[in-house]
Image: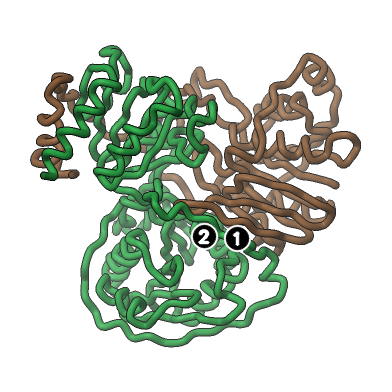
Chain colours: A brown, B green
């Protein structure tokens, strides 16, 4: 079984998000980059499914050379090889097109992503790759089991879950529950240095979206503190002042 | 030329988030001086389809093919894209629900359209068609211009509100060719916790963290949520410890929500948690540590032990409800 895992290079979850150049660019000064946490879940499941000689895991990233340490981290966690599509990731449409172009003649059985990247939160890439390749896609999955040519998947729906099956090739975006992220061990870190990381050039594609500006949420006023023994005052404020109950 | 809105049904009914998407799409149709067409797929009674007129849908395309009775994102995307072409709709709107998230990107690729997911406002009318959407897991917004001719917008629940705009909706049957290869996923089972309010849709949310000390102490959280008609949620350490299901985890690596009221009990307010809830309209924090960072983003706060404050809050709420 050949599995392709798409990884995104994102700011560490503790990053304070600020912008520069009149709020048109993300301020990368001092930002630590990590493998997108959801992609780590996808990677962990891919490794579990192929362990013991049952298959191979390739990771793919669309980005510039500065992303290589993040890609090496994925190799240290346990991917067999990696490919980087050498282009700044414009938007999900662009990224999905690049991944689909790479994958179309490589015969991957399964393509996995995280449910969304924690920077643009799109949850778009998996379903777009599925559409570009004309194969099924399942978004926000909680469980993935593969038996031969058939997979059983649980996906989240409002207030519950849906269990579904899919045969043949497919794409899925993984959420919590699919696997526990793996921490690289020393052997993994050492071997990651020599695992293959190939670089391919991007294909041209028309622009469909463009971020023109960023905003940060409006600051809230000062908190109104209510004494712990006057909970009825809180109820009354929520009812008559905030008008939410 | 019209705006097309996909109306997702669950067991033959439309939820509030669907009426919200219709209201939002109607406002865009008004901006564009055109009319709004809705497309429904699956078994929905005519009386329910007529409801869509209340929020401004002038026409409803009803797709009731047997193979499409249950959700298959590939086939649904094909039908919706075909409807957009037939209606000459350059703008397709849907709700950013779990199914919507699996559907919108496929529609966007079919229509070679830019997709604004997690939209929280109407598009700008300065000729740019720029849409404010959530980014950096709630820590920021990205104003995203859709530069392609066709455009797809997935609206965040609770972002726009339901707005009545009564029209008499005309209902038409609609069918499109379905390829066998579009039916690759087969639903085997749907499990819904019917006694619970769905978290992403909920207007009121009661959430608790490690301050609760253990899963056995969630009774009072559920009681408070029950009295309010609220959904329950939790912080990451709580779901990591399996005190609560992962589906309740809100925050940067869980789900992002924007309810009208978010009550955080025994949650300190790590930046990753705040990211997922900062767009809530009103935030109440109950924590025994007056230095908890959550108080900095709260509207109302009580410094006190959850085990004393929550039972009192339940009493006060019962008294309020009379």
The residue at which mark 1 appears reads as B189
Q: Earlier in the sequence, mark 1 or mark 2?
A: 2
Quadrant in the picture for residue B217: top left
The residue at which mark 2 appears reads as B104
Q: Is residue A141 above or below residue B170?
A: above
Out of B146 and A21, give the one closest to the viewer. Answer: B146
Q: Residue at x 69, y 22 (%)?
A: A183
- x, y (%) of residue B215? 45, 28
For disc 2, the chain is B
Query: Left or right: where does residue B315 sit relative to residue B149?
Result: left
Question: Which residue extends farthest right?
Answer: A53
Q: Residue at x 46, y 61 (%)?
A: B152
Out of A151 and A24, give the one closest to the viewer. Answer: A151
Contact, mark 1 vs mark 2 (Cβ under 8 Å):
no
Query: Left or right: where does residue B221 sit relative to residue A135?
Result: left
Q: Is residue A137 visible?
A: yes
For disc 1, the chain is B
- x, y (%) of residue A29? 49, 20
- x, y (%) of residue B53? 28, 77
**Foreground tag (1 vs 2):** 1
Identify the element where label 2 is drawn: helix
Instruction: Respond whether the residues carrying marks 1 and 2 are from the same subunit.
Output: yes
Q: The C terminus of chain A appears in which quarter of the rendering?
A: top left
Out of A6 and B9, give the one closest to the viewer. Answer: B9
Query: Marks 1 and 2, Cα distance to the nearest angstrom?
Result: 23 Å
Circle 1 crowding by C-alpha within 10 Å: few under 14, some 14–19, many from 20: few
- x, y (%) of residue B131? 37, 52
Q: Is residue B34 visible?
A: no
Q: Is residue A192 above or below residue B279?
A: above
């Amino acid at each position: 079984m050949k599995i392709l895992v798409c990884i995104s290079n994102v700011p560490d979850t503790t990053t304070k998000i600020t912008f520069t150049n009149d709020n048109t660019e993300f301020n990368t000064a001092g930002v630590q980059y990590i493998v997108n946490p959801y992609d780590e879940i996808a990677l962990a499941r891919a490794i579990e499914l192929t362990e013991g000689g049952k298959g191979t895991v390739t990771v793919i990233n669309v980005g510039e050379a500065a992303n290589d340490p993040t890609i090496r981290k994925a190799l240290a966690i346990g991917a067999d090889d990696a490919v980087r599509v050498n282009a700044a990731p414009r938007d999900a449409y662009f990224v999905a097109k690049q991944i689909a172009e790479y994958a179309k003649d490589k015969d991957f059985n399964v393509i996995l992503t995280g449910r969304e990247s924690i920077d643009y939160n799109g949850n778009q890439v998996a379903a777009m790759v599925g559409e570009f390749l004309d194969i099924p896609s399942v978004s926000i999955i909680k469980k993935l089991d593969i038996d031969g040519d058939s997979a059983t998947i649980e996906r989240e729906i409002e207030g519950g879950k849906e269990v579904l099956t899919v045969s043949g090739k497919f794409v899925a975006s993984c959420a919590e529950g699919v696997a526990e992220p793996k921490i690289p061990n020393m052997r993994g870190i050492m071997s990651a240095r020599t695992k293959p990381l190939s670089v391919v050039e991007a294909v041209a594609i028309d622009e469909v979206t463009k971020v023109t500006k960023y905003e940060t949420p409006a600051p809230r006023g000062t908190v109104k503190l209510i004494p712990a023994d006057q909970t009825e005052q809180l109820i009354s404020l929520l009812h008559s002042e905030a008008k939410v109950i | 030329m019209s705006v097309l809105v996909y109306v997702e049904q669950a067991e033959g009914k439309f939820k509030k988030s669907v009426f919200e998407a219709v209201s939002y799409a109607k406002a865009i149709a008004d901006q564009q001086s055109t009319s709004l067409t809705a497309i429904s797929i699956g078994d929905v009674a005519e009386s329910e389809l007529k409801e869509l007129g209340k929020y401004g849908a002038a026409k409803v395309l009803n797709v009731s093919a047997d193979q499409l009775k249950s959700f298959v994102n590939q086939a649904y995307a094909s039908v919706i894209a075909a409807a957009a072409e037939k209606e000459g709709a350059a703008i397709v709107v849907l709700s950013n629900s779990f199914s919507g998230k699996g559907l919108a990107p496929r529609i966007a690729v079919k229509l070679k359209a830019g997709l604004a997911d997690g939209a929280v406002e109407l598009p700008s009318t300065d000729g740019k068609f720029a849409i404010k959407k959530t980014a950096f897991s709630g820590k920021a917004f990205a104003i995203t211009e859709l530069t392609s001719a066709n455009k797809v917008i997935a609206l965040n629940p609770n972002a726009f509100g339901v707005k009545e705009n009564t029209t008499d909706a005309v209902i038409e049957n609609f069918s499109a060719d379905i390829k066998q290869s579009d039916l690759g996923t087969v639903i085997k089972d749907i499990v819904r916790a019917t006694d619970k309010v769905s978290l992403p849709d909920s207007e009121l949310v009661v959430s608790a963290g490690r301050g609760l000390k253990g899963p056995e102490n969630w009774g009072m959280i559920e009681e408070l949520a029950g009295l309010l008609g609220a959904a329950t949620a939790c912080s990451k350490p709580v779901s990591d410890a399996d005190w609560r299901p992962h589906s309740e985890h809100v925050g940067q690596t869980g789900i992002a929500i924007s309810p009208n009221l978010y009550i955080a009990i025994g949650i300190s307010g790590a930046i990753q948690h705040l990211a997922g809830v900062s767009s809530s309209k009103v935030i109440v924090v109950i924590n025994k540590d007056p230095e908890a960072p959550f108080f900095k983003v709260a509207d109302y706060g009580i410094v006190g032990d959850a085990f004393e404050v929550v039972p009192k809050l339940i009493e006060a709420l019962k008294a309020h409800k009379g």
